[in-house]
Image (cartoon, rainbow, N blue to C red):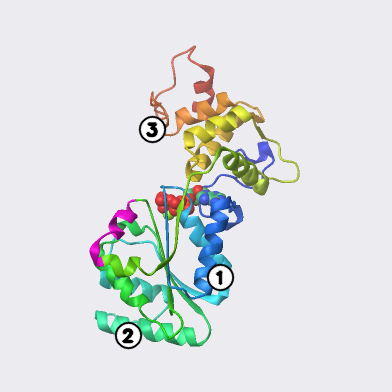
Amino acid sequence: MYEEFYNLACAPFHNTPDSRFFFETEQHKEALAKLEYTVRNRQGFALVTGEIGSGKTTLSRMLIRRMGQDARVALINNTRVSSHQLLKLIAIEYGIETPAICDKATLLTLIRRYIENQHSLGRYLVVIIDEGQCLNIDEFEEIRLLTNLENETEKLVQLLILGQPELRKILKHNRLTPLIQRIVMYTHLQPMTFEETARYIEFRLLRAGKERLDVDFSQQALHVIHERAAGIPRLVNLICDNALLVGYSRDTHLVDSQIVTAAISQILPNFNDEPADIMAAAPPPGAGQEMDHGRRL
Ligand SMILES: Nc1ncnc2c1ncn2[C@@H]1O[C@H](COP(=O)(O)OP(=O)(O)OP(=O)(O)O)[C@@H](O)[C@H]1O
Ligand SMILES: [Mg+2]
């Protein structure tokens, strides 16, 4: 909508794990390098936790991209399933043909066969479980049995589990000690620092920009964004996207703190002490200009 106005080729703050927009903060960079190392050395089991929206899924997409054709990846997003369904999902992700009615033992055999075959062809077999905090103990145990596949020197299946901080609590369960002992890489993604937030915004704008980008964020605006988003990339995106809309509606190429504050007041009630209802009727005549312009969008 505002792309042309700011001379952008596409929207810079889309909330999707698009690898073209991957910004390497020190920790994202380090985590990605460690994950790739764990997989390429067939070390077994890696765990990544982080606050909601901190970049876990994005990180896993980057790993898949980096591994390219070297790996066969089963990416499991839907973790609210039984352990049998979980195995079925893994089989589907690997493209293994299974009979319509297939008991667990057969399913496991088929998956094992596939894994051994692909391994013998030199491929890395990766299982990525996203939203791991939704898994229960039984499912974790099932997955562990799968990762037990190994030869004398290496693990045949590389398991990456991603989840929100409460995942750590679930993994403390006694029955999961064998799994925990097998973790060779663990990272907790921290929110970005102010400097990172500022560079993140600049990076995404440049990535989306045409030759001459026609938009600027004031230092004060960057501070407000960082503070309100608490350094969480998803929230930074949300605020910036709305700030660009407000700027566009006010016909200005400079996003200042006033614009950011107006944008925030229109997004989520929890950003503001005084929730603003963006669906509400137009404000009474003479009400603040900021809201007037914002609502017209
Ligand atoms: N390093 C990064 N570079 C660029 N964009 C990022 C980065 N990390 C996160 N983002 C952006 O933030 C959004 C949210 O990130 P992501 O979905 O990876 O978070 P998450 O930790 O998986 O969240 P949830 O806990 O809800 O699953 C992404 O869609 C992406 O646009
Ligand atoms: Mg995620």
* Picture quadrant where residue 162 is located: bottom left
Distance, label 3 to label 2, CA atoms, is 49 Å
Of the pair 180 and 197, the residue shown nearer to us: 180
Q: Left or right: where does residue 207 sit relative to residue 242? A: right
Q: Quadrant of the N terminus?
A: top right
Q: Amino acid at mark 1?
A: Met
Of the pair 43 and 252, the residue shown nearer to us: 43
| Disc 1: which residue | 67
| Disc 3: which residue | 270
Residue 23 in the image, given as x and y percentages of width and height: 59, 51
Residues in magenta? Answer: 166-175
Label 1, residues with CA under 10 Å away: few <14, some 14-19, many ≥20: some
Which residue is located at x 48 percent, y 43 percent? Answer: 232
Label 3, residues with CA under 10 Å away: few <14, some 14-19, many ≥20: few
| Disc 2: which residue | 109
Q: Secondary structure at mark 3?
A: helix
Badge 3 vs badge 1, beta-carbon distance below 8 Å: no
Q: Secondary structure at mark 2?
A: helix
Q: Main secondary structure of the magenta part?
A: helix
Q: Earlier in the sequence, mark 2 or mark 1?
A: 1
